[in-house]
């Protein structure tokens, strides 16, 4: 079980696209920084629908996207640390 940590928007890098090429259904995706912006795009919402997607709450708040991304599971930094301990590996893309 792997935690895939995506930090850049799909318009900035191919990180998320590459992640989806290698991800397993038991893995989790954590979106932080500019990566949270991908959830504003229907195509990415659809592509991520089958995965356990988590969003770093502070980054959503910093961008004023709380109401637009309220359907997604938001976590804090303490939860992020806990996830790193419950997953076998963490990959930062």
Image (cartoon, grey):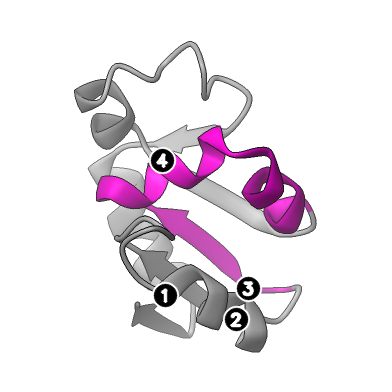
Picture coordinates of residue 93 (x, y %)? 35, 77
- Secondary structure beneath dot 1 equals helix
State which tag comes first along the sequence, 2 or 1.
2
Q: Residue at x 67, y 44 (%)?
A: 45
The image's mark for residue 71 is none
State which tag comes first along the sequence, 4 or 1.
1
State which tag comes first along the sequence, 3 or 4.
3
Q: Are marks 3 and 2 in contact (CB under 8 Å)?
A: yes
**Label 2, label 4: how far apart the Cα atoms are:** 25 Å
Q: Residue at x 59, y 51 (%)?
A: 53
Name the residue that disc number 1 marks: 15
Span of residues in magenta: 26-49
Q: Are marks 2 and 4 in contact (CB under 8 Å)?
A: no
Name the residue that disc number 3 marks: 27
State which tag comes first along the sequence, 3 or 2.
2
Q: Residue at x 43, y 60 (%)?
A: 10
**Label 3, label 2: how far apart the Cα atoms are:** 5 Å
Picture coordinates of residue 18 (x, y %)? 53, 82
Name the residue that disc number 2 marks: 1
**Label 4, label 1: how far apart the Cα atoms are:** 14 Å
> In the rendered structure, does residue 48 fall within the stretch colored magenta?
yes
Name the residue that disc number 4 marks: 37
Quadrant placement of the N terminus: bottom right
In the displayed structure, 74 sits above or below 70; it is below
């Amino acid at each position: 079980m792997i935690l895939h940590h995506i930090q850049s928007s799909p318009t900035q890098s191919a990180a998320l696209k590459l992640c989806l090429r290698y991800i397993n259904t038991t893995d989790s995706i954590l979106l932080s920084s500019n990566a949270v912006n991908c959830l504003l795009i229907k195509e990415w919402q659809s592509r991520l629908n089958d995965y356990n997607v988590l969003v770093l709450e502070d980054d959503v708040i910093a961008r004023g996207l709380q109401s637009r991304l309220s359907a997604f599971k938001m976590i804090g930094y303490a939860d992020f640390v806990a996830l790193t301990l419950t997953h076998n590996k963490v990959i930062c893309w």
